[in-house]
């Protein structure tokens, strides 16, 4: 799950069927789960939102690599535009219901702060990261809006947290936080990144 950067397509766009191709091979869309999701609001079957979106396709090679090319690897690509917190709760409940009998991994693709100074990114990203580590989706949603944190994937992160908790998640661990400045050496305008595991 990731953000819809283009604004094309539906508010919550589920790629309904077919195959995604990467340099590591083909990965089918799990039509069983996608068809179950799109039966309920706010999920809708939609390809248009995915045409120019990059947030999901960049995750697929990692899944292929980490799964050791499992033949049964399949994906359910979902991108989100802005929706209300109540709709996030509804989406999280529906997602959890669709996955409760599945051997599934919820992958959330997002950056944190965009094009702010290193110190500002570290400060405000910590507000969002702390809410995630506390497994508090409502606080995450509130903080990103209240502090105007330019976290592009706050909606999928909120939905994913809600679903994860319903599926039994009890803890979260920050693996690493870095910014683009750590690579470019330019700390005047950075983008923040974090790896977090929820289990």
Image (tube, helix red, strand yellow):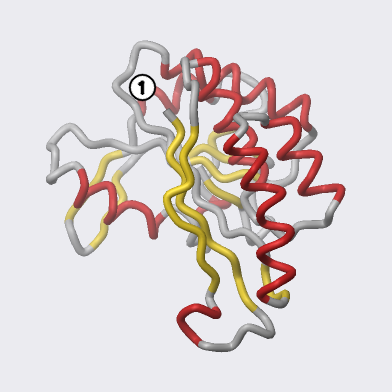
Determine whether the residue tagged by mark 1 lies in a helix, strand or loop: helix
Where is residue 114 shown, x and y percent of the image?
67, 69
Question: Which residue sits furthest right?
Answer: 146
Where is residue 23 shown, x and y percent of the image?
21, 64
Q: Classify 10 Å Cα crowding around label 1: few (below 14), some (14-19), many (20 and above).
A: few
Residue depicted at x 46% and y 17%: 98
Tell me the quadrant of the picture where the C terminus can be found. top left
Nearest the eye: 45 or 159: 159
In the rendered image, the vertical position of residue 180 relative to residue 41, given as above or below: below
Instruction: Give residue 5's quadrant in the image.
Output: bottom right
The total number of labels drawn is 1
Where is residue 195 shown, x and y percent of the image?
45, 52
Residue depicted at x 73% and y 27%: 87
Question: Which residue sits furthest bottom?
Answer: 185
Where is residue 186 shown, x and y percent of the image?
59, 88
Question: Left or right of 129: which side holds 23?
Answer: left
Residue depicted at x 51% and y 59%: 177
The residue indicated by pointer 1 is 32
């Amino acid at each position: 799950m990731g953000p819809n950067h283009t604004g094309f397509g539906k508010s919550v766009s589920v790629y309904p069927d077919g195959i995604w191709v990467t340099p590591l091979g083909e990965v089918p869309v799990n039509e069983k789960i996608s068809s179950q999701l799109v039966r309920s609001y706010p999920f809708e079957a939609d390809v248009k939102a995915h045409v120019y979106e990059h947030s999901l396709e960049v995750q697929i090679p990692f899944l292929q690599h980490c799964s050791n090319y499992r033949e049964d690897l399949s994906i359910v690509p979902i991108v989100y535009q802005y929706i209300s917190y109540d709709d996030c709760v509804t989406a999280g409940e529906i997602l959890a219901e669709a996955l409760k009998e599945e051997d599934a991994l919820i992958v959330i693709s997002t950056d944190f702060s965009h094009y702010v100074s290193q110190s500002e990114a570290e400060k405000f990203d910590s507000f969002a990261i702390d809410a995630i580590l506390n497994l508090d989706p409502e606080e995450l949603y509130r903080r990103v809006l209240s502090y105007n944190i330019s976290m592009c994937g706050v909606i999928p992160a909120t939905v994913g947290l809600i679903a994860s908790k319903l599926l039994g998640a009890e803890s979260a661990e920050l693996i690493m936080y870095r910014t683009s400045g750590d690579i470019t050496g330019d700390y005047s305008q950075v983008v923040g990144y974090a790896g977090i595991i929820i289990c």
